[in-house]
Amino acid sequence: MKKIISILSVITLVIIGFSLNSCVKDKDYETPQINCEEPEIPATQMTTIEHIIDAWYAINPGPQDRNPYKFAAVDADPVYVAGYVISSDKDGNFYKELFIQDDPANPTRGIKVGIDMRSLFAHYDMGRKIYIQLNGLAVNKSHGEFVIGEFDGNSVNNIRENVAKKIIKRACSPEVLSPKVVNSVNDITNDMLGTYIQLNDMQFDRSLLGKTFVDPNDSYDTHRIMKSCADGYEIKLETSTFANFKDVLLPEGSGTVSGVLSRDYGDHYFVLRVNNPEAFNFDGPRCDPPMLDCNGTNVGGSTVVFSDDFESYSSNSTNIGSWLNINVNGGSNLWKVKNYSGSNNYVQCSAYNSNENPLEAWLISPPIDLDNSTGEKLSFKTKTGYNNGAALTVFVSTDFDGTNIQSATWLMVDAEIANGPSSGYMTNWVEGTADMSCLSGTVYIAFRYLGGDGGITTTYQLDDVKVTAN
């Protein structure tokens, strides 16, 4: 009996040993590295992410140039770049890509590395410093982002798995990442692209309350608008439809969010990509401005209290009758009267080529007297062109003094505003309406454009502003 037990024990130990050996072989990066040796690469063989990007710009002086910068293919004279991993594909929001930056806490530049592997997080975890041998690789700009990959013909492709295992070295232990704190979306610059940032005092647009990270109608990515509580500037959260948290409800409060600063697929605007929902700390109260909320019935009769179709003003003029046309920051870009095919006047505002960031332009109506009417309703029409983000907000005020915008109380109007397309202009006007029946006395209606050259530059067209009553 003892002999049988002894044989079984030996067999069991062999099986356990084989299992452990298989685990280490297949999951070697998930287990502690015993006797790990840090990569020792001479400084003469090192370059930087910033130098790589500068080298690309040196051969691509034009804004439309896209020539890959190729690294020498001579292994006898190797060159490496180092970076800290800031992205994780564990939850499915990144796919066959690593974002690395040049410092774990105070990065100056970041870059994407395309790798034809899944479960990259098991090999290159967050905060891990990696060294990439660049010989035979290339860098190019794709969809607004700099990408390192294998050079093939005239294209830069993902690094093959077996190649990646040969040319990427890892430090023994990951570092603790500290995201770069950005207090305003308006402070984002191109140098932050591909780095790990934290946005403070943010919340999702109120229209997204009760919605999930991913729109079930989207095929690839969903963009959800986040707004700054401090100044109202916006950035879009980009979430892959393959993320395993796609059906999770968006957090409803306000606070901080950390993620990788990226560009949308069309390279129209910055987006933020998070590794998982734990990136959000939205435990604070919402910071929505006060809303116009009248809840009247039978509003908007046949009596016209105020109406302007902008037909009486000269085309291309910023002098729009009794309307106040104000650039808050003192710039020259304002709302302007436009005309389409000589048949219809409207007013328009856009930050495109404005050389202003931010561009905040208010168009405020003449005073409107509501004391002699009941059941008032506001209506207006909008169209957008080359839409790359929401920039128009509608407000009403009963205490505006006709001069000082900042001292007035402005109630946000929850009315439909045009949205899209990203290329070209909308064909049909979108009508927005709002109940104003609970207001009295003198009222002002304001249309605020808030965007910036190099950021949100959507063109907004406005027409047929009207207040009707019973």
Image (tube, rainbow, N blue to C red):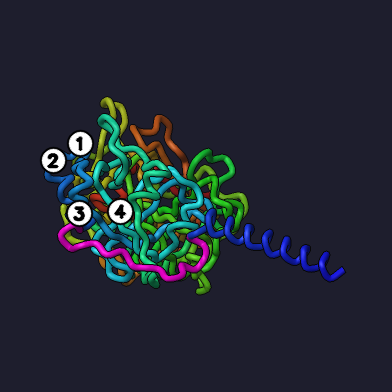
Q: Is 6 located above or below residue 326 in the figure?
A: below
Label at residue 59: 2
Q: Which residue is mark 1?
A: 67
Query: Does the CB distance between marks 3 and 2 fall below 8 Å?
Result: no
Circle nearer the viewer, 1 or 4: 4
Query: Does the CB distance between marks 3 and 1 fall below 8 Å?
Result: no
Query: Does the CB distance between marks 2 and 1 fall below 8 Å?
Result: yes
Determine which quarter of the picture holds residue 427: top left
Label at residue 132: 4
Asked if residue 277 is among those painted magenta in the image, a careful observer would answer no
Residue type for callout 1? Asn
| Disc with the residue nearer the chain's start (4 vs 2) | 2
| Disc with the residue nearer the chain's start (4 vs 3) | 4
Graded by Cα atoms within 10 Å as few (under 14), some (14 to 19) or many (20 or more), the crowding at tag 4 reads many
Q: Is residue 192 visible?
A: yes
Residue beneath the point at 12% across and 45% down: 58
Asked if residue 45 is among those painted magenta in the image, a careful observer would answer yes
Question: Is disc 2 placed on a helix, strand or loop?
Answer: helix
Question: Is disc 1 placed on a helix, strand or loop?
Answer: loop
Residue beneath the point at 37% across and 41% down: 158
Q: Which residues are magenta?
A: 29-47
Residue type for callout 2? Ile
Query: Does the CB distance between marks 4 and 3 fall below 8 Å?
Result: no
Q: Is residue 307 visible?
A: no
